Image: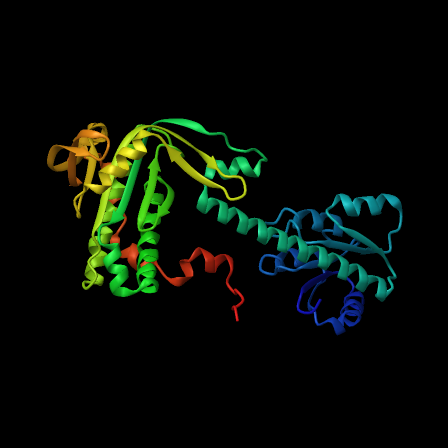
Amino acid sequence: MDGETILAVDDLPENLMTLKLGLRKFNFDFHMARSGDIALEMLTTLKPDLILMDIQMPGKDGFETAQIIKQMPGLEDVPIIFLSALRDLQNIVRCFESGGVDYISKPFRNQELVARIGTHLKIRRLQKNLETERSKMHTILSNILPVSYVNKLKEGQRPQTEIFKDAVIMFTDFKNFTGISRDLGPETSINHLNRIFFAFDEIISHFGLERVKTLGDGYFAVAGINTNGPDAPIRSVCAMLKMQEFIQFYNKEYPKIDWKLRIGAHIGDVIAGIVGYQKIAFDVWGSPVNIASRLQNVADLTGIVLSDDMYSMVKESVVVERSESRPLHNLGDHKLHYIYSLSDECPETFRSSYDNLKAESLYYTYSEETDIIKKLFPNPSKSN
């Protein structure tokens, strides 16, 4: 019980001193308040692990003080033990109705008080640990599943496979990653890839896309699944152009590496859902996925290649360098459009959103502290 914070609230200083002396050997961080109002003022900055509350006090009594505490952000779950000479059933019931977890009659026996405090502090520690583990689980799920799927799982539902109309599918990969890995070694090359994918995650989040997964040095994302609406194509184009912009900035910071990014995108109807029973993953299926993957393979190294269907949705908002028909592996001839920037006719909403996300900010925001594994498990044990 050492080091935990306790606030005692009683209008009589001798009672407060009795409590302090009775608990001194446990090395609590012990605080005292001689009224409900003083306690409430202290609680604007103090976050105790447990509160000992007298009932009969001038001004706000213990019942009213406890009710207010339970409405204060961050204090809803702090256990309150009432200490009072009032022993009638009505007042004991009011203690629990006011948010108390226990009641001890005055004059109390110190051994009993210590035992009750120890029990409720242990329960509080278990609650905090449970809250931490739930938060970790939510973070992990949110990094592998769309938010809507996480919410359904939290409600006890298994999300059903769905058909999504006009979803945008985009793939990226690095044409020269094998050479980079050979030259830099696996650890250094993966460190670079992590930093780049951090920026990509920030970009797709900014534009409302959903990362499906990474495939080696490839990156697979969709729009129109979590967020519906006719603007999914232009949001996707903004995201892809920003990815290329970031890579150009990154190459200036590391001129000896020269990452060569290819991006392709298509739009169409897809099936999306969770696969797996022992290990789950979110995935997307359908011919638009295959087409987008093939487009990435024929993309230029500084722009984006769009299918004709995708281009028709954004043609007023983009600048085309060239258009051509060419065969895609096992899919026949397709008309392709190679784009390199937003046009002057791009709606101001998307132009501003694009301009406000700076490549240099994405680069400098990254640090080891942004690593989700280190956030969730800050002190992993070292293997022998």
Q: Is residue 351 visible?
A: no
Q: Position of residue 184 (x, y in %)?
A: 27, 65
11 or 261: nearer the eye? 261
Residue situated furthest bottom in the rendering: 25
Report the residue at 28% width, 30% height from top: 267
Decide: is 269 above or below 275: above
Residue that appears at 23% across and 43% down: 263
Q: Is residue 252 above or below residue 224?
A: below
Name the residue nearer the viewer: 208 or 188: 188
Residue 218 location (% of width, % of height): 31, 47
Q: Nearer the viewer, residue 76 or 382?
A: 382
Query: Hey, which quadrant is residue 17 in on the image?
Result: bottom right
Q: What percent of the width, then of the height, locates residue 356?
A: 26, 47
On screen, residue 131 versus residue 340, left or right, reads right
In the rendered image, is residue 95 in sight? yes
- Describe residue 171's horizontal placement relative to residue 100 as left or right: left
> What color scheme is it?
rainbow
> Residue 119's spot in the image, x, y percent?
76, 58
Q: Nearer the viewer, residue 359 or 199?
A: 199
In which quadrant will I find the N terminus? bottom right
Give residue 35's quadrant in the image. bottom right
In the picture provided, is 312 more to the left or to the right than 103? left
Position of 37 with respect to 145 (left or right) is right
Q: Residue at 51% across / 60% down in the picture?
A: 377
Q: How many numbered circles are shown?
A: 0
Extreme residue toward the front, this view: 330
